[in-house]
Amino acid sequence: MKDYTNKDRESAREKDAARQGPPEDQGGQARQNRKTDAPEQDGAASAQPMVRHEIEGSTDPLPRQSGGAKPPADNSGRPGGGGGGNSGSPPRFHQRLGPDEFAESLKQGKRAVRRNIGFVMVLTCATNLLILAIPIYLFQISDRVLTSRSTDTLIMLTIVIVGAVVMQSVFDAVRRFILMRTAVEVAARLGAPVLSAAAHAALHSNGREYQTLGDLQQVRGFLVSGTLLSFLDVPFAPIFILAIYLVHPDLGLIVVITALMLFVIAIINQKITAQPFAEANMAQSRANLHLDSMSRNSQIINALAMVPEAVILWGRDTAASLTSQVRAQDRNIVSSAVSRAMRMLTQIGMLGWGAFLAIEGEITGGMVIAASIIAGRALAPIEGSIEGWNAFLLSRASYGRIQTLMNTTKLQFERLRLPRPEGRLDVERLLYVPQGTKRVILNGLSFSLKPGESLAVIGNSGAGKTTLGKMLVGSILPTSGNVRLDLMDLRNWDARQLGESIGYLPQDVQLFPGSIKNNIARMRGDASDEDIHRAAVLADVHEMIASLPQGYETMVAADGSPLSGGQKQRIALARAFFGNPRFLVLDEPNSNLDAAGDRALANAIRHAKQSGITVVVITQKPSLLTVVDKIMLLADGGIALFGHRQPVLEELAKRQNPGQQTLRGPNPTAAE
């Protein structure tokens, strides 16, 4: 073993200068020289310096080799991928994919809603005008037909009014049809963008953004509700008030005063119910999170008899939500009752005052009845708006969260479809500090792997191993530094192509509801049976699947049943191998495996090496160290040891002897 000194760096530079390479290699070498100095600088700045050792290997980015790794052949003898290497034929480029413009998707959805609502408003205007047919009919019968006793007038008047009523019903039905289809269009236009934006935003949070899909359903429900129709009818209330005013100014004044009082009640209702409804929604959201946690941990809850505690946690937030909701609904009910009473008293007042005016000879009896009906129609939308105010507040809050998500999620720019990667991995000065904290989880990591090499990452709990694994596949983003696959930063790869080119087995294995075949195929409908079988063979799980009663068609529930923990882990390993990836990250892949499973996992890593797949294994067990090419020891977020397998194992054996100094990292408080 030798220290990473300036003398070693000068020797490496002389060797690299003698190597004849393409121009881009020289740029890569400059990056090597810069990064070689970085670890020593970081170590010098640490409170407790850590001596970094390199054993028969370099942690610097590798220069491009003149001969790339050859892609493996599948069962049919065809190349299995790995384009971009020097395989004798020019690399195949693919078409560009369009960017995900979340804010633009929201604008398009809003434009569609406005267009449809504009047409609905035209129909609403026609509907409200045709509603006047009934009061006019009553007025004409009372003041003209009954006095003239003309049957012809009655027949013609009835025919006209029947036609108006039929048209009013048709227009009302059409506007409801349009609103229903508008709600469907909103779900169709925004469903995928909202889910995509939530998935991207979840990289920087705890995943609450997925609840925005529920907000989209709330908005969709409001578009087909009666509350929206009441809101649309309110602007036409002045038309009815004008009609009443034409009957008699006194009656019109009564309706105007009542309408103003109803508007005041609506404003007061909004003020006194907004806060309780907001508190109820927040508490219900917390209760839903507890419920989701209970569903994911049902086995632990039952095994440890934690059901009462889990119910208490859920019930506490649910009770708070119900309390706030009852308080808000009580106020809303009182406001609705007052508005309803005022509307009925208004009609009584209009009938009484209208009768007095009729006695005085200023209006007729038919006018009194017609004015009373029109007044009820003018005030009904206002009353309906008050009753549905809660739904409006919920929908407005839901739309606000959707708008915030779509406008704040970073635009996914258009990416070039690059040749299929070879599997070369370069990690450059990787630093990670979780948002909102000052703890350094990963501190200046730099290392490289050639295509087809395998690396085991070991270290104590809290060293940063799992965080490193997540960064290597792009599931979380570094605070600074780069993870490069074939020289390209992971953030600059097309997301779909990157996902097809890598495989990932997380520490917490989750399978999707469906068959084993679908889970291995990553739920893709275009997956071929040949690709699924090849992934199972590479992962050495074909025999295990064949022993199941339904084989590849065995159905798996959301909790993974009827599979055991080890079987779930091996199925997830086959999923990582699907699609002939060029880079694999396996996080604690043998945590649930028995001896047979360990042997199968070792065989899978050997198969990956034979296929030219670059593999990073994060493990706590020594059984996998014999099948990898290199070993990296992480300590408190820094690289304490890195090199080829045998020298690193010998160094570790020396450090386990009594009297050796305990290995410390640059940040003893760092957590994984």
Image (spheres, grey):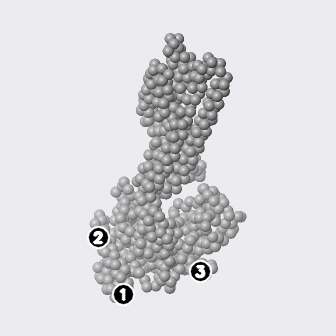
Q: Amino acid at mark 2?
A: Gln
Is 577 above or below relative to 125? below
Is 628 above or below relative to 253? below
Task: Tell me the quarter of the image containing the C terminus.
Answer: bottom left
Q: Quadrant of residue 569?
A: bottom right
Q: Amino acid at mark 1?
A: Arg
How many numbered callouts?
3
Per the model, the C-alpha gap separating discs 3 and 1 is 34 Å
Report x, y in % for residue 477.
41, 62
Which numbered mark, 3 or 1, is in the foreground of this view? 3
**In the image, what residue occupies the spot 50% across and 22% down?**
247
Residue 508 in sight: yes
Q: Quadrant of residue 529?
A: bottom right
**Callout 1 secondary element:** loop
Name the disc covering residue 41, or none.
Answer: 2
Report x, y in % for residue 52.
35, 73
Q: Label 2: few (<14), some or many (≥20) within 10 Å?
A: few
Name the disc covering residue 19, or none.
Answer: 1
Name the disc covering residue 78, or none.
Answer: 3
**In the image, what residue occupies the spot 61% across and 17% down?**
147
